[in-house]
Amino acid sequence: MSKKIKAAIIGLGARGQHYARCCKEFEDEIQIVAVADVLPERVRQMQLEFNLPDERCFACGEDLLRQDRLADVLFICTQDREHFEPAMTAMKKGYDILLEKPISPFPGEWRELLETAEQYHTNIVVCHVLRYTPFYQSIKKVIDMGTIGEVVSAQAMESVLWWHQAHSFVRGNWRNSNETSPMILQKCCHDLDILLWLTGKNCRRVTSMGNLYWFKPENAPEGSGSRCIKCPVQKDCPYDAEKIYLTNKETGILNGNNQWPCDVLAPNPTKESICKAIEDGPYGRCVYHCDNNVVDHQVVTMEMDDGAVIDLNMCAFTSGSRTLDIMGTKGEIKGNFSKNSFKVTVFGEEPVYLDAAKYMGNIKMEYDPYGHGGGDKYLIRDLIDLIQGSHAHSKTLTTLERSLESHFVALAAEESRLNGGNPVELREFKNRPFDTLDEAAGS
């Protein structure tokens, strides 16, 4: 048996904590040995959960990286604009890297990361977790078998969920592209990556339209306050923080949910800690009076090199799930991500309904608080296999190099959106000087 892999984590927000807990699924093969975060309560929580000594707990990523190499792999789960520096330092110290998406909002940093990874022979796996889900794995298998012929068109719906938009992109960490990334990169590089991977096609041209339609001061209900607590219109507002974090059937602490999104408001959520966070924290602000600027709806159309067309529709005003319709010369696939099932119709034949977990070998599907269909756990499995050398590097689904295409498409889409939907030729876009691309990222 290969020696147990040691992992360190920088950034102990919801994603960093979840990846750490996914490692427990494979505790005979991987062990969390060091953590770092700017919030002491998060560090303490992980220290207790993983039985870490004081000398392996750090107040920031810089402190952890000043030490001699502490682990085999470093999980970088910081905010979007805080990935590059720790990744560069970690590679030079000999770490392999699990890198949260997006890689960075700045393409100039993408190239430098790629060149440095090649120089130091570093394995970098990007957290495009949807590729690892039974749902998309099974659809990819059907497409690659030629069951529906050549893919001519695809339409995907990214249903952000009304409360998720309010939590993450109006009140939360990714509300302002000047501080993080454009919405289409931060949220939807997942979806763009999946569409490129499923179809196996290369994008030629991108157009996009969308805007911030609703979450702005002029749409605030008459008489509303700046915070949800004691707001006069609280009763009739679906975005009321007390409803989302206290009483909502899926997300509320009073209904037993002590994971995401409640664990973003408080490390160990209780009714008392959530009420306190709503009262004086950012997640209790009125959604119409925040400093958000990212879009709440956007459509991206990609024309592929072979003439096929792919559409992605991202919208905040939904209560459903990701859906997918792939149309080929011999048939069609329709799928619903949350149901983990899809329908294959070969023209002239009866439709076949497939359960993705059963189709992929009766995979056991467990509760996933992040709506990633089990992909997080299988991502960690792939990372372990890569570091242990039990499969070739070429089989890893989300290497740094493979993940960049979706990032280029996302920033080209953002440029198109900002210019009234004008088409952007992707090849020309990718060949521009990188400082110009950085401007497109919203810096």
Image (cartoon, rainbow, N blue to C red):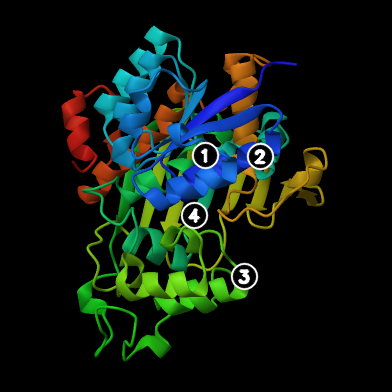
Q: CA distance from mark 1 to mark 4?
A: 12 Å
Q: Quadrant of the C terminus?
A: top left
Of pointers 3 and 1, the one earlier in the residue sequence? 1
Q: CA distance from mark 2 to mark 3?
A: 22 Å
Dot 4, crowdedness within 10 Å: few (<14), some or many (≥20)? Answer: many
Residue type at the position of mark 2: Lys
Q: Which residue is mark 4?
A: 158
Looking at the rendered image, the disc whose residue lies closer to the viewer, 3 or 1, is 3
Q: CA distance from mark 1 to mark 2?
A: 31 Å
x, y percentage for residue 225?
25, 83
Dot 1, crowdedness within 10 Å: few (<14), some or many (≥20)? Answer: many
254 up-or-down from 162: above or below? below
Find numbered disc 4 in the image and state the secondary structure of the residue it sits on.
strand
Dot 3, crowdedness within 10 Å: few (<14), some or many (≥20)? Answer: few
x, y percentage for residue 37?
38, 42
Report the side of 422 relative to 375 (left or right).
left
Residue type at the position of mark 3: Gly
Residue type at the position of mark 4: Glu
250 up-or-down from 87: above or below? below
Looking at the rendered image, the disc whose residue lies closer to the viewer, 1 or 2, is 2
Q: Quadrant of the rendered structure where residue 442 is?
A: top left
Q: Are marks 3 and 4 in contact (CB under 8 Å)?
A: no
Find numbered disc 1 in the image and state the secondary structure of the residue it sits on.
helix
Q: CA distance from mark 2 to mark 4?
A: 30 Å
